[in-house]
Image: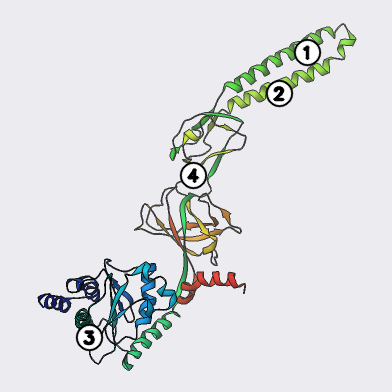
Amino acid sequence: MSLLVQLSRRVREAGKAEEIGFIAVNDTKQLIDYRQSALYLEGKGVFSVSGLPAPDPGAPYVQWLKAAFKVWQQITAGRKTGPEDLPRRLADTWQDWLPAYALIAPIALPGSPPLGILLLAREREWEDQEISLLAELCSIYAQGFRALNQGKGLGLFARRRPGKTVRIIVPALIVMAMLFLPVRLSVQAPAEVAPKNPFVVRSPLEGVIDSFRIRPNENVAAGQVLFEFDRTNLKSRMGVASKSYEVAAEEYRQTAQLAVSDEKVRSEMEPRRGRMQEKAAELSYSRQLLERVEVKAPRPGIAVFADPNDWVGKNVSIGERVLVIADPAMVEMLIHLPVADAIELSPGTEVVLYLTADPQRPRKGKLTYASYKPEVTPAGFVAYRLKADFVADNEPLPRVGLTGSATIYSSRVSLAYLIFRRPLTVVRQWIGL
């Protein structure tokens, strides 16, 4: 009797339905011996399972209990049960989930429909006094659930009153009306601060870069040496050209001397002269190449490139891009808009850039360019290339290389279109209409 009183007090003091469910499946064992227990509530399904803080709706055990409770829903009093009371598909798997003997009792108050069912199971037969005690406990649990439902408005088992229909319809109408509110269509895309109209420094010759004289993002002046090539091959080439020229010049000189007295030799003068001029041109070209080993900045600005170690020792070809020189006062937004987020764009479209390094100060801009075809970005996704100019304000321009995300705004659409635009696109592609 003392245990029954204590259990009743705990149910009355429970603040949540989950507390009562925990008491029902776990603490009932203080009065009735069992191995497993489960609680089913109308409208909630399998609400509590012994030994677990909360049942997993997708677990096979919980799914089997849910199907069995649907068969037991019509009970009006506590009674024994077993596999014989269930359909064959459930009876065949009884031994996988429960012991041989089970007892079920409705969670109900006199004169009221049941709120749920409490299941107890063990390996030995049930006695009549245990069935009566379980009925008393289920009445206590039903009283606790009902008190919580009425006192705190939990709405677990309450029947819907006619007045509550209005409470559901009015918010639904408000939500539907809000779906037609005009909003600005916008998408987000990764972006970075890129130089505008930069000067591209390309390799003037084919060779191996020997060293860099500058660091990444360093300010350079016009005429300053940026990097230089290895001179070994060029010096060897010029030496060979010089020797070839000297040989050709000596042959031409000897031929010119003999041509004074020998008419046959006179006919060889022009080929020898042509050969000498050819070797002279090769020597001049070798000297020009040697003069190009030091690549200088054609104009002042910021040298934009990654790491000098990526270039030192690398063999580059003529015209290969090495770095760019950007004007810090001329920058723009470079945006990669994914194909899936593509919207209608036009010059002058508003763009807002949120830099990762300074997210609290968004920078506004105007769209100036949008590529006609998408391309694969360095990040590996297909996107359209967009460019936007910064709107003049009192804030200094961000430095080249900063990254962030850009919000691109388009025309006004309904809120419903903004929310369901992507699902509608997928559905349309799927159904082909």
Residue 391 appears at what percent x and percent y? 44, 59
Q: For label 2, count other residues whose C-alpha is less than 10 Å away and answer few (under 14), some (14-19) or many (20+).
A: some
- SS of the residue under disc 1: helix
State the separation of the CA atoms marked 4 and 2. Answer: 37 Å
Residue 160 appears at what percent x and percent y? 32, 89
Asked whether the residues under the numbered discs 2 and 3 touch, taking CB atoms below 8 Å apart as contact, a structural biologist would say no
**Vertical arrangement, residue 145 with respect to residue 279, above or below:** below
Q: Quadrant of residue 8?
A: bottom left
Q: What amino acid is labelled 4 in the image?
A: Ala
Which one is earlier in the sequence, the residue at label 4 or at label 3?
3
Which one is earlier in the sequence, the residue at label 4 or at label 2?
2
Numbered label attached to residue 326: 4
State the separation of the CA atoms marked 4 and 3. Answer: 72 Å
Q: Which residue is most to the top?
A: 261
Asked whether the residues under the numbered discs 1 and 3 touch, taking CB atoms below 8 Å apart as contact, a structural biologist would say no
Observer-nearest residue: 287 or 112?
Answer: 112
Q: What amino acid is labelled 2 in the image?
A: Ala
Which one is earlier in the sequence, the residue at label 1 or at label 3?
3
Numbered label attached to residue 150: 3
Which one is earlier in the sequence, the residue at label 1 or at label 4?
1
Residue ID for mark 2: 281
Asked whether the residues under the numbered discs 4 and 2 touch, taking CB atoms below 8 Å apart as contact, a structural biologist would say no
Numbered label attached to residue 375: none
Which one is earlier in the sequence, the residue at label 2 or at label 3?
3
Asked whether the residues under the numbered discs 1 and 4 touch, taking CB atoms below 8 Å apart as contact, a structural biologist would say no
Residue 4 appears at what percent x and percent y? 13, 77
> Marks 4 and 3: which is nearer the front?
3
The figure's colour scheme reads rainbow
